[in-house]
Each structure stands twice: as C-alpha cells, then as structure tokens.
Amino acid sequence: TGNGTKDDPYIINSADELAYLVSSKADATAGKYFEIAEDIGTIVLQSQDFAAEITALDSAAAVQAYFENEEYVFTEWIEKGWEQACFAGNFNGNGVKIYGLYTVSDTNAGLFSTVDAGAAIRNVVVLNAYFHSLSSTANYQVGAIAAVTSNTGYGADAAGVVWLDGCVVGNCYMRNDASDLARSGVLFGAASSDSVVIDNCMVYGNDARHSATAGDHSVAMPLINTTNNAI
C-alpha cells in the first residue's frame, strides 16, 4: 500500500516484501519512502521452526554456534548476484527487530547490499544475525546494515551523504575472508559515498572479525570502514 511519498510511504508487511525492496535497483527506489508496518514488531528471516530459538540467543557466540550447527539448514537472506541492488530511498523500520539474517556465500553481506548517497535508513534493529563472506579474492563487503555505501547519482543528496538514524546492531556474528581489510564494518562494510551521518545508533555484543591472513580471523571490524572517506 502507499504511493511512495513522505506523507504516504509504501508499507512493507512481510519478510518477502522486505527482500523485494533490498533486491531492487537504485532507479526503482530513488527519492521514494518505505516503512515497515507499525504493527510488525518482529521479523524472523528463518523458518518458524527456528524462530523461538533464534530470538532467544543472547550472545554472538551463541549465534555462531547455532548457525554453524550442521544439522540445521538455514535460509540465505538474498541469493548470490544481488550486488547490483542499490537502495536510494528513505527507509523507516518503525523499530522493527529483524532476527536471523543469514548469509554464507561469495557475495556482499548485509541487510542491504548497497545504500546510495541521499538514502536514509532509520529505526531498524538487526539482532542475532550471521554473516560470512567466503571469498578471499573477490573482496566482497560485510556490514550489518549495508555492505557498502555508494554514490551513483540516483540518490537525492548531491552532497553525497548517507543517513543512519536510530538503528541498533546486536549479538551478531560477522566474518569476512576478503584479503582487503578495507571492506568490513559492523554498520557498513565500506563507505564509498562521500560521507555517512550517524545519529542515535547503538551496537552491542557483536563478534565482528576480518581475516588478517588465511585462517586467522583476529582483526576486529570497525563500526564503518572509512578508508579514504569521512564520517
């Protein structure tokens, strides 16, 4: 429902509709407004068979152990190839808690793949997520909110700013095997927009690691990787 304006945003009513949004390209979302329905307090991105256990996990270590249990088969958030997706609009999560975001593949990893300059992400909580970008050579990005920020020109902000407001990332396990250490961050994996503005956000309890060498995941990720960029 809605027409995509500030006063009448598109309303997202399910995990499937959210997946469709984050898989869209910049020209489909530029300047438009999207909101999670106010009566949706929680979205679990896994089978309901796992929902109660996933929401009860209380640490990144518990998240890692649970999602690395080979007896379980989990649903990938977005399948390989979504790197062309780019969000260039305004997203209001209305405080929704998103649990069980799971990515293990040779791809970007995050709630969004790419967020364009001029876009705004507000009031979304990512909890108990598991991210593992496997490629040691392709150098994909990992970030809980978005893998990377960009500046394609579709976004509404000519100054090249991405806005993040009222967001929380908690108890997430994050690992990136890329050889380039400039591609991982707890909030955003890489900041390729001119700047990022962060207000009223919180991170807690995350285990976010990057490969220093093959098999050594001892380098902690920053909140945002800002190599050659400003915050």
Image: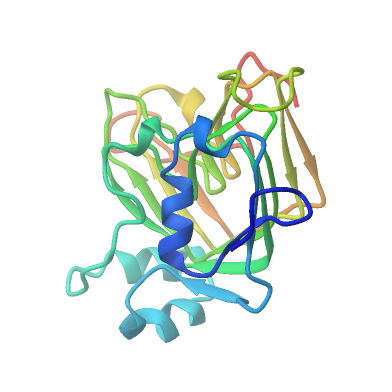
Query: Could you tell me which residue is drawn at 43 percent across and 71 percent down?
Result: 62
Residue 97, position as x, y percentages in the image: 60, 69
Which residue is at the front of the view, 156 or 141? 156
**Residue occupying image coordinates x 53% and y 41%:** 146
Left or right of 14 in this view: 7: right
Residue 100 drawn at (x, y percent): 43, 67
**Quadrant where the N terminus lies?**
bottom right
In this rendering, the answer to whether 19 lies above or below 114 is: below
Q: Which residue is drawn at 27% across and 67% down?
A: 74
User: Residue 179 falls in which quadrant of the image?
Assistant: top left
Residue 151, position in %: x, y? Answer: 60, 20
Q: Which residue is drawn at the image coordinates 49% and 50% (left, top)?
A: 111
- The percent coordinates of residue 227 (x first, y second) are 60, 18
Quadrant containing the C terminus is: top right
Q: Nearer the viewer, residue 12 or 217?
A: 12
Left of 60 or right of it: where is 64? left
